[in-house]
């Protein structure tokens, strides 16, 4: 049973699709029911079955309820993919402290809360997989991402810590560093992207999330901890 947060669109949806195509029971979690329904319908057209569960990664109670719902239908979560997140771009001087806090709450603490809801069962069973989706910006930050990049560095640090903590329980941990992708989230972040950021990214390809998902799963199959893709 694979549970994917942020599974209603973008990379999360494509990872869910790929897992489903390989025979996994898949639950996708997101906040917006309309987006979840659209994702389920789209994947059904692709002859893929996933189950949608409404849940907000910024709320521990919401996640606890979502995981319980998913497990009631599909059994214990054996693989969790933490893919929910988003970027509010802008120069440091233009981004409010509140926006910094909101991005940390979503991108980092959302991962923490997701793992708090799923890892205890894996520890009890002494088996499982945790996939933490960070960002290429956790490898090299640059102008325009002062509020976003640190949240993804935090995810990277969490993955490195959990990797060693969970070894005695046979739980594999993977840290994923996706590039810019052609997703609704990327369209949204471009709305506030400074000119200097666009200049840095000029000429950089915008990757297909399906191709990135395929690359990620191949690296997971190979047992890689650090997963660079695209």
Image: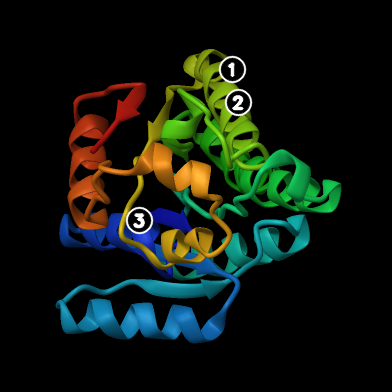
* Residue in the picture at 50% in, 66% down: 188
Q: Which marked residue is nearer to the observer: mark 3 or mark 2?
A: 3
Q: Is residue 192 left or right of residue 64?
A: left
In the image, 63 versus 87, the foreground residue is 87
Residue 176, x across and y down, in percent? 39, 34
Q: Which marked residue is nearer to the observer: mark 1 or mark 3?
A: 3
Q: Is residue 219 left or right of residue 155?
A: left
Sequence-wise, the earlier of marks 3 and 2 is 3
For the residues labelled 2 and 1, the Cα–Cα distance comes to 5 Å
Residue 111, x across and y down, in percent? 61, 43
For the residues labelled 1 and 3, the Cα–Cα distance comes to 24 Å
User: Can residue 78 be spotted in the picture?
Assistant: no
User: Can residue 44 be spotted in the picture?
Assistant: yes
Residue found at the very far right of the displayed protein: 97
Which of the numbered marks, if any, corresponds to residue 161? 1
Q: Is residue 208 above or below residue 79?
A: below
In the image, 156 versus 18, the foreground residue is 156
Which residue was labeled with disc 2?
Answer: 158
Which residue was labeled with disc 3?
Answer: 11
In the image, 127 versus 189, the foreground residue is 189
Q: Quadrant of residue 223?
A: top left
For the residues labelled 3 and 2, the Cα–Cα distance comes to 21 Å
Q: Is residue 112 left or right of residue 228?
A: right
Contact flag, marks 2 and 1 (Cβ < 8 Å): yes
Sequence-wise, the earlier of marks 1 and 3 is 3
């Amino acid at each position: 049973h694979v549970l994917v947060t942020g599974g209603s669109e973008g990379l999360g949806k494509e990872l869910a699709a790929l897992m489903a195509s390989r025979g996994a029971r898949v639950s996708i979690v997101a906040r917006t029911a309309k987006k979840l329904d659209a994702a389920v319908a789209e994947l059904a057209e692709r002859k893929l079955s996933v189950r949608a569960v409404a849940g907000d990664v910024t709320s521990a109670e919401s996640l606890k309820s979502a995981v319980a719902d998913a497990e009631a239908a599909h059994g214990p979560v054996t693989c969790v993919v933490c893919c929910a997140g988003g970027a509010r771009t802008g120069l440091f001087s233009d981004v409010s402290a509140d926006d910094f806090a909101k991005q940390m709450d979503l991108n980092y603490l959302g991962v923490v809360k997701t793992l708090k809801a799923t890892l205890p069962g894996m520890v009890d069973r002494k088996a499982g997989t945790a996939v933490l989706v960070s960002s290429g910006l956790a490898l090299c930050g640059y102008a325009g991402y002062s509020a976003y990049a640190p949240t993804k560095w935090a995810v990277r640090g969490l993955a490195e810590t959990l990797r060693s903590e969970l070894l005695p329980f046979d739980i594999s941990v993977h840290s994923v560093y996706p590039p810019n992708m052609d997703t609704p989230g990327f369209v949204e972040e471009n709305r506030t992207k400074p000119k200097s950021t666009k200049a840095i990214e000029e000429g950089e390809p915008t990757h297909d999330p399906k191709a990135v998902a395929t690359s990620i799963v191949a690296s997971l199959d190979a047992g890689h901890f650090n997963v660079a893709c695209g």
